[in-house]
Every structure is written in structure tokens, then in C-alpha cells.
Amino acid sequence: MPDRAPLNAWWGTPLVGALGGYLASLVGWPLPWMVGSLLAIILVRCLTPWQLAEIPGGRKCGQWIIGIGIGLHFTPVVMEQVLSHFGLIFFGALVTSLSAVVGVWLMRRTGEDRATAFFSSMPGGSGEMVNLGARNGAVLSRVAAGQSLRVLVVVLCVPAAFKYLLGDGAPVFHPAAVSWWWLALLFPAGAMAAWVWDFLRQPNPWLFGPLLVTSAVSIGWDLHIGLPMVAVRSANG
């Protein structure tokens, strides 16, 4: 639904999402504020007449916060770890790309046109794949369905598999401190980078713009800060 949805079409979306995230956190589900919110909104839309709508500007705002949060995880120590495990990371990216190619091949075998098959199978932001598909003549309903199914399967299965097969990992006793001074600088800078990225017609501007700026600053100044937990939960929901 477009961002100009009336108030009564979307006011319940954050409430239902927050309730779903809270219930998922009670049962110990991994990524509760993402998975719980996702499932709660899907169930309400599918099982009731209440057709919850997208919050105006909510997707961009969530990507903005997530981009800042991911960028803050990039420090010189993290970059050393990335470089030392580059082979494994490259292998994972290669497997993901190959699986997407197989998906395109299977959809082409069923008679789908090239653009629809490509944008339905490519990993990436589901909304961005729909936008790119619209520019290239894809059947948008099928691209949206394929991307939604992919996101649903990945979000439901991958975190749960990691948790129940590998365990919870070492607990974090010292969460990153919140520096409001740095955040007051990074959020406007991230928004400016997003506008520039969007002006250049690059994909996912509100994620990659803030991420690139924040990661560069975090590495350059060796920051060890994070976002307030309420911001992380709101963006993931």
C-alpha cells in the first residue's frame, strides 16, 4: 500500500507488530522482534478482515536505523576478522548467487519471462526487487510473491536453525554504549547519504547510504558504540 495510506489503515500495524514481537520474545524465538512482528501481521491480514497497511515512511525509516546499526558494528577488529575469513564469506556469497541462478532457471522452465524470473529469484530487499522489476517489465505480482516467500522462509528457518543446532553462543555481558553525540551526527549524515544514493538511482538507498557512511566513520574513529535497544527493536519490527 502506498505511503499515503489513511491513518485508520495503518495505525494498528505497529501495535500488532509490537505484540507479536513481545510474544515471540517470551517463548525465546530467535530474532523475536522481527519474526514475531512478521508473523503477527501476516496472521492478522490473512485470518481477519483487518487489512493492516504499511506505515507511511516506515520502510525507509526502518532501513535508515538498520543501516546505522549495522555500520556501527564495523570496527578495525571486525574488519580484521572479515579479512581473515574472506574465503568462507566468498564461498557463502557464491552459493547464494548460484542458488539464485538455479531459481531463475527453474522459473524460466515453467514459462516465466526473463525479467520476472530474475527479480523473483535474486536475493536482496523484496521491496527493491519489486521496484527494479517494475523498471524492467517484470510481472510485479509474481515478483512480490516470490520475494515475500523467500523472505518468510529465510527469516523463519535460518535463525531457528542456527539457534537450535549451534546454541545461543557466548552471552554478551557488556553491550555497546550509546553515544548520543555521535548518533546526532551519524543520523543526519546517513540521511544525506541516502538522498545522494537515491539521486544516483542505486538500490536500497536508505540502507546502503547510512551503512556506508556509518561504517566508514566507525572504522576511521574506532567507535565502539551502538543504538538504543528500543531503536533496534522498532527497526526490526
Image (cartoon, grey):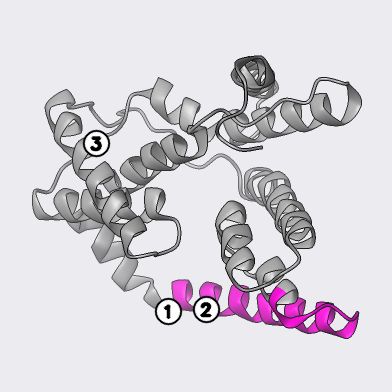
Residue type at numbered disc 3: Phe
Write down the quadrant of residue 114 in the picture.
Answer: bottom right
Q: In the shown orientation, is residue 157 left or right of residue 168?
A: right
Q: Is residue 63 above or below residue 16?
A: below
Amino acid at the residue labelled 1? Gly
Query: Circle 1 sits in a helix, a strand or a loop, which is it?
Result: helix
Q: How many marks?
A: 3
Name the residue that disc number 1 marks.
Answer: 87
Q: Position of residue 184 (x, y in %)?
A: 17, 29
Residue drawn where x is 87% and y is 31% of the image = 46
Q: Which residues are magenta?
A: 87-115
Distance CA(mark 1)–CA(mark 2) = 6 Å
Give the alpha-carbon distance from disc 1 to disc 3, as whole Å. Answer: 33 Å
Residue highlighted by disc 2: 91
Q: Is residue 5 magenta?
A: no
Q: Residue 151, image x and y in percent? A: 68, 52
Mark 1 touches mark 2? (CB < 8 Å): yes
Other residues around mark 1 within 10 Å, as few (<14) / some (14–19) / many (≥20) = few
Number of other residues with Cα within 10 Å of mark 3, as a class: few under 14, some 14 to 19, many 20 or more: some
Q: Which residue is mark 3?
A: 187
Q: Are marks 1 and 3 in contact (CB under 8 Å)?
A: no
Q: Amino acid at mark 2?
A: Phe
Q: Is residue 19 left or right of residue 233?
A: right
Identify the secondary structure beneath mark 2.
helix
The tag earlier along the polypeptide, 3 or 2, is 2
Mark 3–mark 2 CB contact (< 8 Å): no
